[in-house]
Amino acid sequence: MNTVYRWQDAPSSEFAVIGHPISHSLSPKMHMAAFAARGMSSSYVAIEVHPGEVAEALDHLATLGYFGVNVTVPHKEDAYAWCHEHSEVAVKLRVCNTLDLRRRFGTNTDGEGFARSLDGFTFENRRALVLGAGGSARSILDSLQSNHWHISLWNRTQSRADALVSEFGFEAEILSLPDIIGHSLIVNTTSASLDGQRLPIRWADAMPSALAYDLAYGKGLTTFLVDASEQGLAVLDGRRMLMEQGAAAFEFWWNVPAPRAEMLAALQ
Ligand code: NDP
């Protein structure tokens, strides 16, 4: 657990992650490991910001001299609204997870982090099934589409999947059931695993070479990944994506290569 500051009591620092709740965030540990590996003396803290207070909190942190801020649930849209300038991907998705407060510039490294987390895997085909249509699915769909995957999308509440696809113009086939047949990548962006709940998936239908990927992570495998690994599938949890989106944020702030191995080690 992090030491958590209220934004009104933010200490002297250059970097922070804001969110609500934020005590569980691994970002401070990961970025402090990166700074140490690069011999940097900067610090990175966790700051609790309640809904409705994002603009005021970011103004305050900018006044205190904070330079780089990561933004997590549920503030990514408010962070986008606070910025005066945005990267291309942030404009497309209208959410920011990485800010430069001096320039009031926002970007989004989630999609890049997701794409890079797949480096080193080979896939029998380019067919991906995305489960879930919440905030993280937006970046995942964009990343998969940019990398020329054929996308199937299932969400418990189908109307949310319909809305996501039409609002952002994604090319995805919406499924009424999470049918995994023929997909070499199955990505769980739902928060079901966090509650130990199971999705209605028939794992026996999976391609033997498929990768089951859960954006969630915890101690040991999530329920989604336990079920997939029992079918003999390769599995990946959300730590590699967390590291890669953090590495992209580090490189955005510092313009030097991020120490990926040290950052990943800090998450294990
Ligand atoms: P949201 O709250 O925006 O969306 C939640 C999604 O989960 C919705 O599609 C919701 O469906 C679905 N869902 C929740 N419970 C269940 C259930 N019991 N059965 C089926 N579907 C369910 O969350 P986010 O998209 O922001 O985050 C989702 C997950 O991704 C979290 O576990 C989060 O920790 C993780 N994440 C990891 C990152 C990383 O770097 N590794 C980055 C970002 C997120 P419905 O619409 O029907 O309610």
Image (tube, grey):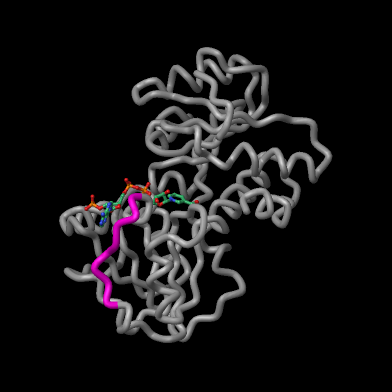
93 relative to 242 in the view: left or right: left
With respect to residue 48, does 36 lie above or below? below
15 relative to 40 in the view: left or right: left
**Where's the C terminus, which quadrant?**
bottom right
Residue 216 image-quadrant placement: bottom left
Q: Residue at x 39, y 85 (%)?
A: 207
Q: Residue at x 60, y 47 (%)?
A: 246
Q: Is residue 201 magenta?
A: yes
Q: Residue at x 38, y 62 (%)?
A: 223
Residue 249 image-quadrant placement: top right
66 relative to 50 in the view: left or right: right
With respect to residue 69, does 140 lie above or below? below
Q: Position of residue 173 (x, y in %)?
A: 25, 71
**Where's the N terminus, which quadrant?**
top right
Q: Position of residue 218 (x, y in %)?
A: 49, 52
Question: How many labels sit on residues?
Answer: 0
Q: Position of residue 3 (x, y in %)?
A: 58, 26
Q: Is residue 257 magenta?
A: no
Farthest-out residue, right: 39
- Highlighted range, magenta: 195-202
Q: Residue at x 36, y 75 (%)?
A: 150
Q: Nearer the viewer, residue 61 or 44?
A: 44
The answer to whether residue 106 is visible is yes
Q: Position of residue 130 (x, y in %)?
A: 34, 65
With respect to residue 268, does 24 lie above or below? above
Q: Nearer the viewer, residue 5 or 76?
A: 5
With respect to residue 119, does 94 lie above or below? above
Examine the residues drawn in magenta and state their main secondary structure: loop
The answer to whether residue 112 is visible is no
